[in-house]
Amino acid sequence: MSKLFARIPRPAAKPATPFGPDSVEVHPRALRVGEGWCRSFAVTGYPREVGRGWLEPLCAHPGRLDVAVHIGPVPAALAAERLRRQLARLESGRRADAAKGRLADPDVEVAAEDARELAAGLARGEQKLFRVGLVLTVHAADEKALDAECARVRALCASMLLDARPATWRSLQGWASTLPLGVDALGQRRAFDTDALAASFPFASAELSTTTGVLYGTTASGTGLVSWDRFAQDNHNSVILARSGAGKSYLAKLEALRSLYQGIEIAIVDPEDEYRRLAETVGGAYVHLGAPGVRVNPFDLDAGPLTGTGDDGGGDDSPEDEPGGALESGPVVRRALFVHTLVAVLLGEKPDPATAAALDRGIVSAYESAGITADPRSHARPAPLLADLAAALGADGDPAARALAARLAPYVAGTHRGLFDGPTTTQPHGHLVVFSLRDLPDELKAAGTLLTLDAIWRRVSDPAKRKRRLVIVDEAWLLMAERSGAEFLFRMAKSARKHWAGLTVVTQDAADLLGSPLGQAVVANAATQILLRQAPQTIDTLAEAFGLSAGERAYLLGASRGQGLLAAGVDRVAFSALASPAEDAICRTGISDALDDIPDL
């Protein structure tokens, strides 16, 4: 009998169900499942060593191939006993060959060495033993196509040093072993240690990836997962470069949301008001600078070091003020130095020596009028306002002080007072803080940027509140146009790692970023670099800066939204951003995203 035939029809009265075929024909070497054919293989031979993600070529096979990995733990006592027996057999064979004058068998020597290493790992508790079975089922439309597809799969297995044996006369058991039932009907298993089993994870990528960190999406083939841990790299910074509409802000929001899952604190500089939905969804703080009633007081005291643009960028680690001592260090002096910088930004120029001296006297007088001195016990009192500084300058008999008070009048009682005419309305603290700068007038853009960056850096550089943090600067080209913003990005890129923080720079103007010394320093100090779809006008600049190959250039020019390259030095992987429906609803903003929800006509 050349063929074993068995037909299992479904009752005619019941309609076909999408959960299974309407019939199965069992043949010696194949199955006819519904209208298609399939053949199963059991892997019986493996290479001595495997690398991470070694199953990816099978998972990425272009044809329809079901890959099932069956895992069963082996008790430690039983594993140790079996290893002892195996070592005894191998040693006995080696001694027998030596007694008869035979040459040593290399395969036996290698097997004995592996068994000894595994036994030592089990004894130290570093390894465990598992019984693993690998079963493959190939599908095709007809028998001829099935033979051709099986030949390709077996050739692929041979290239991976796998010995795939057909499940002859056990076709039904082989097919059932690859169904999502958790049943290994073939029972062809091999002993794996912990490392080998971890490397067999079906969704692991053999390309650039980590086992911890944030999930960015799937590999270009769609079979592997791309996860990346920025905090495990030399520095924690990253850059996201893409043309408009390529999904850079979407990816930044997705990374921020998944970083929050891991307890990472997030601060976002949002020039275009794109992160409001994210802040509202996760219960974060939203500081909408430029909106009515939203104020930030630059005189607020904080225990953290000064960020100010006037220092060396490394923070002030000097000791706290002694109670009743001189104002030689501490929060009050650091705030005074920052106010000096802020006033210079408001004036558009650095004050002359006489004006700077008058300003310093006015700042000290403003704090003293509020009852705040070098004594830390006084720092809980309400901080003075910019109006108090202007009043102190007006009461000073120095003409330079009165002239400075007049120049500050628009920010105290004039048209630009809205940002400074009261105490801070929203405390920029929490697991997520978003600073929106879109509604700031151009005259206050630089000052608002400085206040935002100061609040972020004070939080990041405070040693008493040290934890993992990310600072995301979206549309960074807008901040690079302001000198204070460019200096902040440069300083963060250089020193964020010292404070266990990472800087994420997101921009669509890659040419301008790479065309300035500060921008090049930001990119050079980013261990993680993400390139999404690029415009033809900028691809040459990017190719030179990142060493892109011709294939990578073509991939970035033709990439769809959310597709790109994740690079770390010379290593890189092509990926597609992947979000759940709930995450997608949070991360979508803008007209282009809204248009995606409109059905085709």
Image: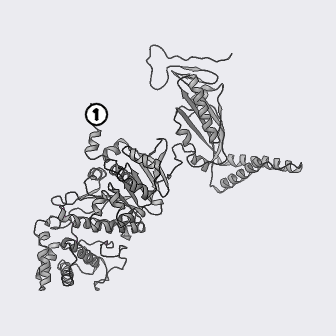
**Label 1 SS:** loop
In the image, residue 245 sits, relative to residue 66, either above or below, namely below
Magenta: main secondary structure: loop
Q: Which residue is mark 1?
A: 599
Question: In this picture, which residue range is highlighted in magenta?
Answer: 292-309
Q: Nearer the viewer, residue 31 or 241?
A: 241
The answer to whether 21 appears left or right of 377 in the picture is right
Q: Quadrant of residue 472?
A: bottom left
* Image quadrant in which the N terminus is located: top right
Q: Farthest residue toward the top?
A: 12
Q: Is residue 298 magenta?
A: yes
Q: Can residue 600 be seen at all in this image of the molecule?
A: yes
Judge whether 236 appears above or below 12 on screen. Answer: below
Does residue 555 appear to the left or right of 322 in the view shown? right
Residue 187 in the image, given as x and y percentages of width and height: 64, 34
Residue 33 % position (x, y): 53, 23
Q: Which of these two is toward me, 257 or 554? A: 554
**Residue at figure coordinates x 41%, y 53% from the top left:** 530
Image quadrant holding the C terminus, namely: top left
Q: Is residue 1 left or right of residue 466?
A: right
The kind of residue on which mark 1 rests is Pro
Position of residue 221 measured from the top left corner of the image (x, y, whole percent): 48, 41
Observer-nearest of 382 and 164: 164
How far from the left and from the top, in percent, is residue 272? Answer: 25, 54
Q: Residue at x 14, y 80 (%)?
A: 393
Quadrant of res 154 = top right
